[in-house]
Image: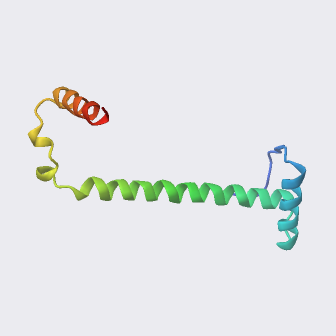
């Protein structure tokens, strides 16, 4: 991703407390407010990508972990009938 030059000016509103915290962190890192916020935005996007990839990996692991022959769905011929039976059973347990 090309981060320079910065041709588009963007304005945001920050609470005074948040602005002070960001400026203090930026000062420790010798970064401007805008540089700090740009870096924060990039890190957020990277974390979202990592989370999305982690979720895909978990889904792939779970979906692939049960053999089709052992899933239990072969026994169910009509899903609608099965759902009604399950709901009736739930209602009996709640009473």
25 vs 56, left or right, is right
**Is 73 rendered above or below residue 57?**
above
Task: Name the residue: 48% across, 53% down.
Answer: 52
Task: Name the residue: 83% across, 60% down.
Answer: 22
Task: Name the residue: 25% across, 56% down.
Answer: 64
Query: To which quarter of the image does residue 65 belong?
Result: bottom left
Query: To which quarter of the image does residue 47 belong?
Result: bottom right
Q: Which x, y percent locates residue 95?
A: 30, 32
Q: Is residue 79 visible?
A: yes
Q: Which x, y percent locates residue 92?
A: 25, 32
Q: Which x, y percent locates residue 26?
A: 84, 66
Q: Is residue 3 visible?
A: no
Q: Which x, y percent locates residue 5?
A: 79, 55
65 vs 52, left or right, is left
The quarter in which the N terminus is drawn is bottom right
Query: To which quarter of the image does residue 91 belong?
Result: top left
Task: Name the residue: 13% across, 52% down.
Answer: 70
């Amino acid at each position: 991703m090309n981060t320079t030059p910065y041709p588009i000016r963007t304005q945001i509103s920050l609470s005074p407390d948040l602005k002070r915290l960001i400026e203090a962190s930026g000062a420790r890192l010798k970064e401007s407010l805008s540089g700090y916020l740009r870096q924060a935005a990039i890190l957020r996007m990277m974390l979202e990508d990592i989370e999305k990839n982690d979720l895909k990996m978990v889904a792939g692991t779970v979906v692939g972990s049960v053999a089709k022959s052992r899933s239990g769905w072969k026994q169910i011929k009509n899903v609608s009938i099965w759902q009604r039976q399950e709901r009736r059973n739930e209602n009996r347990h709640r009473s």
